[in-house]
Image: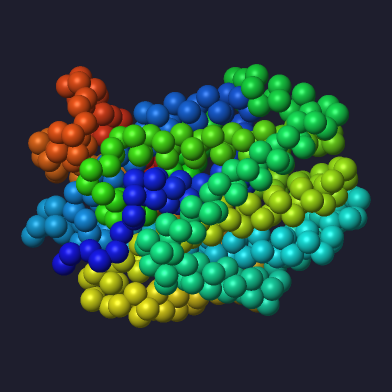
Amino acid sequence: MARQDGFGSSFGTLIALIGSAVGLGNLWRFPYLVGTNGGAAFIIIYLICVVFLCLPGMISEFVIGRRSQQDVYGAFKVLAPGSKWKYAGLVCVLGVTTVLSFYCVVGGWTIDYLIKAIGMKFSVADQGAFNNIFTSVSTSSTKNTFYMLIFLVCTCAVVLMGVKNGIEKCNKVMMPVLFVLLIVIMVRSLTLPGSGEGMKFLFKPDWSKVTTSTVIAALGQGFFSLSLGCGTIITYASYSNKKDNLFKTSGLTALADTMVAILASIAIMPSVFSYGISPTQGPGLAFVTLPYVFANMPFGWLMGILFFFIMFIAAISSSISLLEVMVAYLIEEFKANRMKATLLSFSVVLILGTLCALSQGALSGVHIFKKNIFDFFDFISANVLMTGGGLLAVLFVGWRLSKKDFKDEFTSSGKYNYSPWFLSTVLLLIKYLAPIGVALIMINGLI
Ligand code: PHE
């Protein structure tokens, strides 16, 4: 069936891909991983993982999506007709459903924090108070469910407007705003007294903190941050133009995503150091340490508003890409219209998201494999479904798709020329290094 909707330009595709990639992974997870894994040492390892493992993964998914011009299930079905490969698409659909369910809960926290920042609720001066705020935000059943619902409704509203008029247009506004505001926060952070210590931490590697698990954490972070393994790249690529430069678009997406992660760390670490707080706080960094720091710095209230606003933008541009995978699947495989497909996806995510939202409150007694529901969803998506989907995608392009087809798609049917050794290197990375890397994240996570 010919596509009726798609991205309007190569810039539209790029900005939507960046919107998907830039998310809570960049603003929340990356900085705290840098903090707990030896600062610059982690950043260097991360960069290597992105270039040699994650970028080949992204190129593979791009090739699958653009070659097939189909939703994630249809893509494997069209490229490997009559085979079992189509089930790889189902793994991706399951993956996005679980990721979206807990992502919406965290997205809801960003709304809750934004409202608190606007209402100047961060004016208390001791750090314990911020721990209590976070505990009350993450354990309150009603608030968690309410804000998750608002976040999900906003996501659905954009997806409902379509690929070109909804997803593309919104990202074209949101991404530049995010970038500019991040720079504003960064400048504030760098002009605080004592911020130099934070910069030293970020750019002077401490190799003593590096272990095998640092490398695997960097790899897993790159994989999540580039939105690999759950069909978002496949789906977005399927809406892109055949004439676009596939390598350039993937490379720029990875570059922009990495830049935002590093800028976010520069926006956070110097302030944390300036207030004499240890950078190794872990996941509480964005939701406990930073509000405390903002409460104490000059113009901090404004920085708090800006920071939680960009957290919200980053989260929603990613959740839109997750939901679109489900919606495209329902539209193309079940001939649903966009309205019906969005409503059905909304209902499924609402049910699962509510379970996640209640998992630290009313349902805190419910455990699956010794984890509460939220943690279980996080675990199963990161270690089984996303890694599984990502592994299948690289294996598919490396071993199932013919070299001729790969080359044809990668070069836009010969429009862009690459030397034979470059093409062979990319293919070699896809065939061997990327699958080994993804398998390592999977095994490490499961053990
Ligand atoms: N890349 C997003 C982030 O960094 C998360 C995401 C994962 C989005 C998978 C889509 C698909 O937060």
Q: Position of residue 234 (x, y in %)?
A: 30, 52
Q: Position of residue 125 (x, y in %)?
A: 91, 50
Q: Total marks drawn?
A: 0
Q: Quadrant of the N terminus?
A: bottom left
Front in this rendered view, residue 447 or 269: 269
Q: How is the image coloured?
A: rainbow
Seen in the picture, residue 206 relative to 348 is either above or below; the reply is above
The residue lying furthest to the right in this view is 125
Q: Position of residue 40 (x, y in %)?
A: 61, 24
Q: Residue at x 22, y 71 (%)?
A: 333
Name which quarter of the figure residue 142 lies in.
bottom right
Front in this rendered view, residue 344 or 229: 344
Q: Residue at x 35, y 80 (%)?
A: 340
Seen in the picture, residue 315 relative to 293 is either above or below; the reply is below
Front in this rendered view, residue 223 or 305: 305
Q: Quadrant of the C terminus?
A: top left
Front in this rendered view, residue 219 or 439: 219
Q: Position of residue 244 (x, y in %)?
A: 27, 42
Left or right: residue 347 versus residue 361 is left
Q: Is residue 163 visible?
A: yes
Q: Residue at x 53, y 49 (%)?
A: 175
Left or right: residue 151 versus residue 426 is right
Seen in the picture, residue 45 relative to 140 is either above or below; the reply is above
Q: Is residue 32 visible?
A: no
Q: Residue at x 84, y 60 (%)?
A: 120
Seen in the picture, residue 381 relative to 373 is either above or below; the reply is above
